[in-house]
Image (cartoon, rainbow, N blue to C red):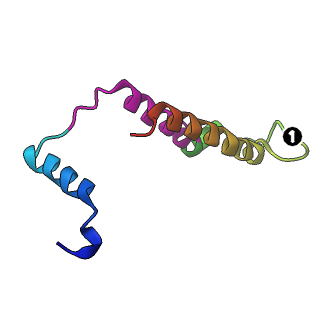
């Protein structure tokens, strides 16, 4: 075995697990994983749904709604990503 892989026993175990069940997919019935993906999907859909916020009024400090909504979407997205990280947990 190569010297740089001598201590990489976790690689051998993960390959062995995959080799036992070739061609099988894991069922996405895990509630935590589903919730994690939903939390990550919400800010993406909000950012891509431009007709929802393609307006000039109301203005905030002189900025049109389009700009300040996009600026507000950044911390909201961070919150959703943080929540998805906490729901998903470390595996």
Q: Which residue is mark 1?
A: 60
- Left or right side of 56 for 61: right
Residue at image point 69% right, 42% down: 75
Magenta-tinted stretch: 26-46
| SS at circle 1 | loop
The quadrant the C terminus occupies is: top left
Residue 40 sits inside the magenta stretch: yes
Q: Is residue 71 above or below residue 76?
A: below
The quadrant the N terminus occupies is: bottom left
Can residue 37 be seen at all in this image of the molecule? yes
Predominant SS along the magenta part:
helix
- Percent from the top left, x then y, of residue 49? 56, 41
Can residue 54 be seen at all in this image of the molecule? no
Residue at image point 29% right, 73% down: 4
Question: 14 or 61: which is nearer to us?
Answer: 14
How many residues crowd mark 1 within 10 Å: few (<14), some (14–19), many (20+)? few
Residue at image point 19% right, 57% down: 12
Residue 13 sits inside the magenta stretch: no
């Amino acid at each position: 075995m190569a010297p740089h892989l001598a201590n990489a026993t976790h690689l051998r175990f993960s390959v062995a697990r995959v080799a036992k069940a070739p061609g099988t997919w894991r069922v996405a019935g895990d509630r935590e994983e589903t919730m994690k993906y939903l939390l990550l999907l919400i800010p993406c859909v909000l950012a891509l749904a431009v007709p929802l916020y393609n307006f000039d009024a109301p203005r905030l400090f002189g900025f049109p709604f389009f700009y300040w909504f996009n600026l507000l979407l950044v911390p909201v997205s961070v919150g959703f990503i943080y929540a998805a990280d906490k729901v998903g947990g470390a595996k």
